[in-house]
Image (tube, coloured by chain):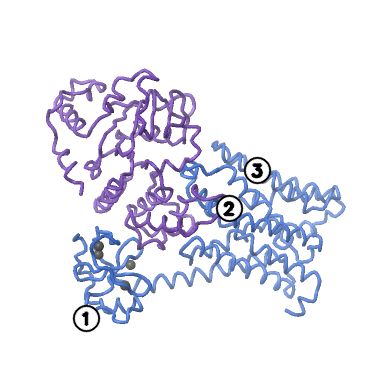
Chain colours: A purple, B blue
Amino acid sequence: MLMSAARTSPEPGVAPAPADAVIDLRRASFGYGERPTVTDATLTVRRGEIVAVVGPNGSGKSTLMKGILGLNERTAGTLTLFGVPGDELRDRARLGYVPQRHTLSTSVRATAEEIVSTGRLPRIGWLGRLRATDRQIVARSLDVVGLADRAATEVSTLSGGQQRRVLIARALAGQPDVLIMDEPTAGVDAANQHVLADVLERLVERGVTMIIVTHELGALERLLTRIVVVDGGRIRFDGTPERYAAQRGAVHHDHDSHHHDDELRPHPSGVAVGPLDAPHDGSRR
Amino acid sequence: MIDLLSIDFMQRALIAALLVGTVAPMVGIFLVQRRLSLIGDGMGHVALAGVAIGLVTGVAPVWTALVAAVVAAVVIELLRTRGRTNGDVALAVIFYGGIAAGVVIISKSPDGTPANLMKYLFGSILTTTSSDLYLFAGLAVLIAATTWALRPRLFAVANDEEYARAVGIPVLPLNIVLAVLTATTVVVAMRVVGLLLISALMIVPNAASQLIARSFSGALRWAIAFGLVSSVGGVALSYPLNTPSGGTIVLLAVGLFIVTAMVATARTQLSRRRHDVAEAHAHEHGIECGHEAIPHGDHVDYVHDGHLHAAHESHYDEHGHEGPHSDPDGTADTAGTAGAADTAGTTTGTAR
Ligand SMILES: [Zn+2]
Ligand SMILES: [Zn+2]
Ligand SMILES: [Zn+2]
Ligand SMILES: [Zn+2]
């Protein structure tokens, strides 16, 4: 059911969003100004899914994600978040946003804990301060990403991968219902990618719903339940990693004769499940 | 000092210095964080136009300066938000238009002497009247209270505007509040520091505190301390030296900055020398990592293949060997490092 979501753009209004949908996009276009960079996107993400949004640089995958977050303009279609129209969602922190940052702002000194605490702000009153429970949540968020010992460390002295994990912890501190990550592995060295994948695996075990925007699956592939391919501002594929691997294999064989749109057309199932899919289930502890 | 305190204008100037020394760095840290270190300078330019209008019309110049600076602050913030490429140029037009208008209008006022202009531009301990002082105290309390109350959110917005917007923190209103706080600080500091030097008292103490602080809250405390020492010290010195108070305050702040820079450099070199880093460490220790954790002074060491590893900046430090080599009284890092001299560069940190 999910697999068919985006292949042939369904009529809007047809098939209501499932009850456990956290994000439901219907024929939505996003962009800045008049010319949308993402058009006709239909996508439903349900609780507990681990979705990778992949595509080359400039394909529109970041625009799609920022559109869901309300950071750019939606020029057409509908966006429903947690069953509420996107614009009417007051509690924005239910979407945990992990932006792509090669470095954290180093204009002034700040500890990892101070950065992560900002993620808690949407959950406390305007003039309120972090109470003991809030501090516990901040500490636990740092612990989940493996930075408990570096809570008091100044963030500019941390490595790129560690800074990325600080940003994940910041999103976790808001106790979001879904984590939306923009290129969490970009610019992170191999060793730190592994640590990062372990962190994400821990989140998977806790049942966190995740949308990971990335231009390469790399170490994350084993965690995914679903892959969405964006290219040229459109969703070109939406399905399980198994189907993705199978079709990627097919595409690879006769690359020249295929028009791009046809590349990821569904294939008879059971064909060529690639080696990339093997660790998918086995990796769960 | 007792002599100084017995003089009326000196008392007023010192109280004004206390107020300014506290609030200017408090607001300034967010300007540094947003990389807007020079915005206060521009608001000082515009405030001069306000002062001039006050002098010509007979309204208290403090009030007209406040109105001019606050209006300019809001306009500047809105221009910045539009984010057009020539926003920078628009700011320049506002700033230079402000100071030019100020100079021209003041020349037409009855008090329009060059000496009078100098006082507004570079500060003077003689100019703070007692009615000014009540207003300054009121404004300073307002600035301090607002900044303190909004501090977590101002920090969040200055740290990552896009994230703040995504989680629903009102970014533009907070930025406008910061701009108005800056404008108000400019006016409070106008008498003792002067409109051309105000920005320095917002920024230089923060520049110094950034050299030694390791957290935002620590940096803020240091900046206020540096600000107080410079402003109160500068006012106190300017009387016996017969110098403009603003210039004296800022020179003192710059002097503190230089001394701090030297201390910080010396400290970094010392800590770099006695320091033993675990190599190629792809594993993050933590509560559930499976390695035994041993309390060691103010931190914990993890037993990793017989080595004791402690988190430091982006890496792990070697804190000696498990067993006979480890520091028995568990006090200082230096002791642990000395004990670990034989392990230098021989780690096998990649194991999981
Ligand atoms: Zn460990
Ligand atoms: Zn230790
Ligand atoms: Zn270790
Ligand atoms: Zn170290």
For the N terminus of chain B, the quadrant is: bottom right
* Residue B19 marker: none
Q: Which residue is drawn at 67% across and 51% down?
A: B183
- Co-location on one chain, circles 1 and 2: no
Residue position for label 1: B324
* Residue B74 marker: 3
Local packing at callout 3 (Cα closer than 10 Å; few below 14, some 14-19, many 20+) is some
Q: What type is the residue that disc 2 sits on?
A: Leu
The residues bearing labels 1 and 3 have C-alpha atoms spaced at a distance of 66 Å
Q: Residue at x 64, y 60 (%)?
A: B23
Give above or below for A19 relative to A179.
above
Check disc 2 and report its element: helix, strand or loop. loop
Residue B332: image location, x then y, percent: 35, 78
For the C terminus of chain B, the quadrant is: bottom left
Camera-nearest label, 1 or 3: 1
Chain designation of label 2: A
Residue position for label 2: A127
